[in-house]
Image (cartoon, rainbow, N blue to C red):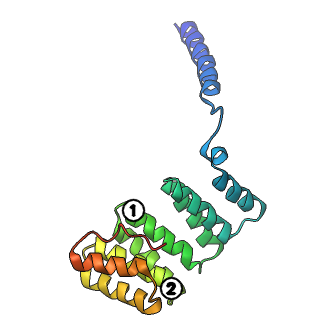
Amino acid sequence: MLLVCTQACASHQRSSRSADRRTQVVGATVETRDPLLAAVLTQLALVPSAAHHRAVATEYRRLGILDTAFDHLTAATRLDPRDAAAYDARARIWRDWGYPGMGMPDAARAIYFAPRSAAAHNTFGTLLAAAGLIEQARHEFQVALSLDPEAGFARANLLRLESGKRVASVQSR
């Protein structure tokens, strides 16, 4: 019986190894198929920086790969703990995932590090609106417009809020 088990185990190990080889990715991945992503990944490999991590995150977000975008934004905040743009982008991902409350600390950090950023105030407003905090959201959209009267995204969100429509669908950038 032990001999049979050993042979079976050895046979299983051989088939597992060959299965591992069979399941290796052969061909193009999104990182090689998408020229914009490939370019920013190359920049990041050459010069690891918060800005390059944000650029990579932007491309992954464009492709709808939010978990990897989030990871690169986290890497950016580790390299530069004052990176308001990275915190703002992470907050948007939390919002897009349907967890506005989880994004509020990141949005607050973005505003703390960039208090004059209309985009950061707008993002915070979208999180507040998604959480049902309408008056606070209205205030953030108004702050965004006071900082940048040309901020169409904040104006659109404020109008959506006033009309009772869903706000989080309007992006900051």
Q: Which residue is mark 2?
A: 117
| Earlier residue among tags 2 and 1 | 1
Task: Check disc 2: other Cα within 10 Å, few if <14, some if 14-19, many if 20+.
Answer: some
- Marks counted in the figure total 2
Which residue is pictured at 32% across the width and 88% down the height?
Answer: 139
Task: Please say if 5 is above or below 35.
Answer: above
Q: Quadrant of residue 47?
A: bottom right
In the image, taking residue 22 as reference, residue 142 lies left or right, namely: left
Return the mark for residue 96. Answer: 1
Residue 38 at x, y percent in the picture: 68, 52
Return the mark for residue 88. Answer: none
The disc labelled 2 sits on which kind of residue? Ser
Which residue is pictured at 73% across the width and 61% down the height?
Answer: 43
Q: Is residue 99 visible?
A: yes
The disc labelled 1 sits on which kind of residue? Asp
Residue 163 at x, y percent in the picture: 22, 76
Residue 63 at x, y percent in the picture: 52, 53
Q: Is residue 108 visible?
A: no
